[in-house]
Image (cartoon, rainbow, N blue to C red):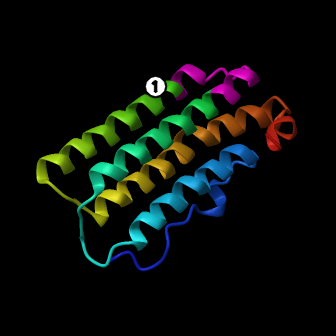
Amino acid sequence: MNVVSPLKLPEAFETGISSIDEEHKGLIADLNDYLSSFQQEAIGDFDKVFPVIIADFEEHFAAEEQLMAEAGYSGLERHIRHHQQILVELHTLLERCRERGTAETGDVIVFFQKIIDDVSKADMKFVEFLLTENRLTEFKSR
C-alpha cells in the first residue's frame, strides 16, 4: 500500500464543535481501518464497504445540517447543496469502481479529500457564522 501514514484531519480543520469534530475523526478512522486491511493496491470488496462509508457521510451531513438549522445558519441551503455535490461525487466514484471491478487506495483517498473539502469549504464558514453571532460556546459541547 502506498499510504505511508494514517490519514489525519489537520488540527487547523477542527471546528471546535465536539459532535462535528468527533464525526470527522470517526469517518477518517473508518477509512484508515479500511486502508490498513490491504497489502496491495487493488481493493476487491469495495462494493461492500464504499456504500457503508457513503451512508456514514450521509448520516454525518444530516447531523451537521440539523445543528446548522438549530443555529439559524444563514448559509444552510448553500451548505446542503455542497453536501449533495459531495454525495454525487462519491456515488460517481463508486460507479467507476464497479465498472472497473475494483478500487484502489487512491479511491479511498478521494473519500478523505471529500472530508477535507467539506471542512475547509463549508464547515469553517459555519464556525465563522457562530463566531460572528457570538454563539460558538453554545455549540461547542454539542
On-image quarter of the C terminus: top right
Q: Is residue 92 left or right of residue 66?
A: left
Q: Is residue 134 left or right of residue 56?
A: right
Which stretch did the figure color magenta? 66-79
Q: Which quadrant would residue 72 be assigned to in this image?
A: top right
Residue at which label 1 appears? 81
**Front in this rendered view, residue 42 or 85:** 42
- 10 Å crowding of disc 1: few (<14), some (14-19), many (20+): few
**Front in this rendered view, residue 40 or 82:** 40
Q: Is residue 20 magenta?
A: no
Q: Is residue 74 magenta?
A: yes
The amino acid sitting under disc 1 is Arg
Furthest residue toward left = 100
**Front in this rendered view, residue 23 or 38:** 38
Helix, strand or loop status at disc 1: helix
Q: Is residue 51 above or below residue 38?
A: above
Residue at 42% of width from left, 45% of height from top? 52
Give percent across and percent down for residue 18.
75, 48
The secondary structure that most of the magenta stretch takes on is helix
Residue at 12% of width from left, 47% of height from top? 99
Residue at 31% of width from left, 79% of height from top? 39
Give percent across and percent down for residue 22.
67, 52
**Front in this rendered view, residue 116 or 38:** 38
Give percent across and percent down for residue 100.
12, 53
Residue at 72% of width from left, 32% of height from top? 129
